[in-house]
Amino acid sequence: MSTHEHPDYLGHHFETPQQQYDSSKLGMWLFLATEILLFAGLFCAYSVYRSNHPEIFVYAHQYLDKTLGGINTLVLICSSLTMAWAVRSAQTNQRRGLILLLSMTLLFGCCFLGIKYVEYEQKWKHGLLWGKRFHPHTEETRSHEKTAPSAVPPAIASQPAPVAPPPPTGEDRSLIEAAPRGPAGLAAGAIEERKPGHEGSRPSNVQIFFGIYFLMTGLHGLHVIGGMSVIGWLLVRSVKGHFTSEYFTPVDLGGLYWHLVDLIWIYLFPLLYLIG
Amino acid sequence: MASGDMAASGAGVEDNYLTHSHGFKSWFFTLDHKRIGLMYLVSILTAFFLGGVFALLVRTELLTPGKTIMDAETYNRMFTLHGAAMIFLFIIPGIPAALGNFVLPIMLGAKDVAFPRLNLFSYHLYVAGAIFALASIAMGGVDTGWTFYTPYSTTTNSHVIAMTLGAFILGFSSIFTGLNFIVTIHKLRPAGMTWFKMPLFLWALYGTAIIQVLATPVLGITLLLLIVERALGVGIFDPALGGDPVLYQHFFWFYSHPAVYIMILPGMGIISELVSVFSRKHIFGYKFIAYSSIAIAVLGFLVWGHHMFTSGQSAMMNMIFSALTFSVAIPSAIKVFNWLATMYKGAIHLDTPMLYALSFIFLFGIGGLTGLFLGALAVDVHLHDTYFIVAHFHYTMMGGTVIAFLGGLHYWWPKMFGRMYNETLGRIACLIIFVGFNTTFFTQFIMGSHGMPRRYYNYVPQFTPYHRLSTWGSYLMAVGFFLMAGYLLHSLFRGRKAPVNPWGSATLEWQTSSPPPHDNFPEAPAVGDPYDFSNLEYDPSLPGYRRRGGPKA
Amino acid sequence: MTETSSTPHGLSIHIMGVPVLLAVWALLVVGTVVTVVAAGIDFGAFNLWLAMAIATVKASLVALYFMHLRYDRPFNAIVLVGSLLFVMLFIGLALTDTAQYQPEMIPGYSPGMKE
């Protein structure tokens, strides 16, 4: 059909490399849109709980390690630079540069996951986990004090105190008197005492924050792993010399995906680690 | 084999996509959109059969109050499986993935979809998702209803994880189909095929694809959260852990309401084709129908809260969502009025596809108008969770989507397989299904308005006559479907060979042979107005339509 | 700084210059430092918006330059912006609703709500 010569990387149903390239890019952007909406659910959960229970977030975010989070942000930004540069190398036929830059991106990815692992392990040790598994321990939490100085009230590990309706405070959103306990069938054990006005005292339902923290960073981590697999595959293909300035679409698309992972982290970092 | 009649058009006489290559692998790993469409067709029809059997079991159980053939536990599983199989395995992929895959590139004048490999991957995902869903059924099924509401879905001991994992995977299959269609329509339109030369079915598929891409990921995250909630106890939706079950419903309906437009929009697209072709008249208000597809796709995202009027949603949002719900009626009505205007003074041919199109307009009219009752807040409080809802969504989903799907299936059947089915039997089956459908579901409107709650195993004796009638209606429908299966299968082997253009349509798929060759078109098709029938004439020797002054057979 | 190139097969592409890449990277690093520092200062409710504004600037830099959006087909940008609009719609309506009904919930009826 086509009067052009048909290079072998060009699909039979495309007329020109430009058409194929533009199609692939549009396809990738649409896929990124689906990824954004996938994360939207978690951002929605975050917004809802944060706006309705800001005290949980103010209190609990101090247990996250700002330093490690900040370093990880820088690591991802650097990996984004090397990735963008790798695309440039592919476009300009610099095969060795491409291989080097892809390897560096991969390395930064490993670095990110390593740091994330350290953070997760700390949380695990201190029992700062989601929903059912939220059992903070006193000692470990104290030793954690260095990284989150103002955060550790001695009461952190106190078990559910006798149920009593706490007096309403200024922040209370409800004017209705608290009932002494939930109706039968609901977990009365989850009702804990809150000392109003005492800064740093643990609000109820802190586990919600850690649930959201693990969901968001966990899903993001899975995407990092996915992105690294793609980059690994690109690395193998670039070693084999598959990419040229004529055909570099996979590098370009892999790059877009990796940048999206970075984009999401750019929002996750301040939302989870910084602002309470 | 089947293309003797199209010898007139010259090139590639014997070779068509069905005979292009042989063997299981040549099908299961094919990159040809037509074969993938056909595999989807077989799969979704299997799912439809399965869902239909569950439906008949549910209806049979309701023949008498109390136990008829199964206990209450089994009944809960049956209606859940009916819903899950019909929605996730049949209706959502139904028109876009099966008919759309086959027709879209040919209608557009392209050789394939933009990403054939992704298309195949999407089919494989469908199969994988279906296997998970079937595994869940084999292990004993799910009893939550297809909506998987928390906290029941996180506490019940039925097999929710397998089913939701299946739905999650099916979601990605749907996303990739939508993505593929958007890129195909944007980038693979040949010279001359401008946006407003596109057949309206493609506009509808485009609108559908927007929803598939933007809404389905939210279902993905919802089901993922449900799975981790069940497996690990994260507690985001669990009130006992400080979570909010109403939030789950927001998540679920943010996808699932737009999803009903994934189901109905492509159906409306088919009707736009059928009404024009079988009235032998240019479609009325082309641009209005085209834009209304996009309007429905976008408005569909703004109304999800009308599923939550009685779920503890705030009064203010109830009012907002109620008002927005009414707005969706506008583009839907625009379509219906344009179809009616197209038929006005047209030369209406009552072939089987047209009968389905007429049924659609009637049934969708009822389904759509009763939707307005339910969108009104005060009325909804009375009708919520009654058989009125059940009847309403069956009128839109079955009376709408399934009927449109059947119309499309009959319309494109000769193109897909190169054979004509028995027209008389086709009309009879359509009539039986139409009567059976109304008997089954119209009675449910009455029951619902009298307060019969949905999903109940038992009922008070005053409802017995209605339930009886409804069940007999469902049996009648089953007869119609078996008749249809019979003559369609028969046509594959004994059917008259189909001409290139049996209905006299002006869209591009009717310019190529029936069935089309592997590359869709031997030479680039001439793109013209998709609804201009003036230069087509009937040639009794084919028997079918050909271009005026074109070569005689 | 940036180049466009056309290949023998007529593929017209845009290549980012190294100085631009490095400049964007430097801005991203600065942005990270600023957001950390700003989080240490108490602006009250304004903290959230400040942090989001900085994050959005950073995200735009990544999208426009690292992801080539500034030089790409406009429709790709429409896809991105469109998806963000739908995210805002989703979060906005869900948030409006929960913010409305939370105060109406009866304390003690759910352990989650007890004050």
Image (cartoon, coloured by chain):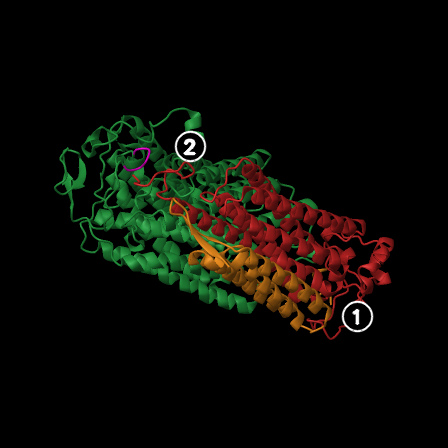
- What shade does chain A have? red
- Check disc 1 and report the residue beneath it: A196
**Element at badge 1?**
loop
Is A215 situated left or right of A32 in this image?
Answer: right
> Which of the pair B215/A152 is nearer the observer?
A152
For badge 2, the amino acid type reads Thr
Label 1 crowd bin: few (<14), some (14–19), many (20+), radius 10 Å? some
The numbered mark at residue B30 is 2
Q: Give the residue displayed 19% in from the left and 37% down from the top.
A: B544
Q: Which chain is green?
A: B
Instruction: Supply the letter of whichever chain is orange.
Output: C
Look at the picture and state if A108 lies above or below C38.
above
Q: How far apart are the two marked residues, 2 and 1, measured between alpha carbons?
A: 66 Å
Q: Within the magenta stretch, is there residue B80?
A: no
Q: Which residues are magenta?
A: B517-521
User: As shown in the figure, which amino acid type bears the numbered disc 1?
Assistant: Pro
Q: The disc numbered 2 marks a residue on which chain?
A: B
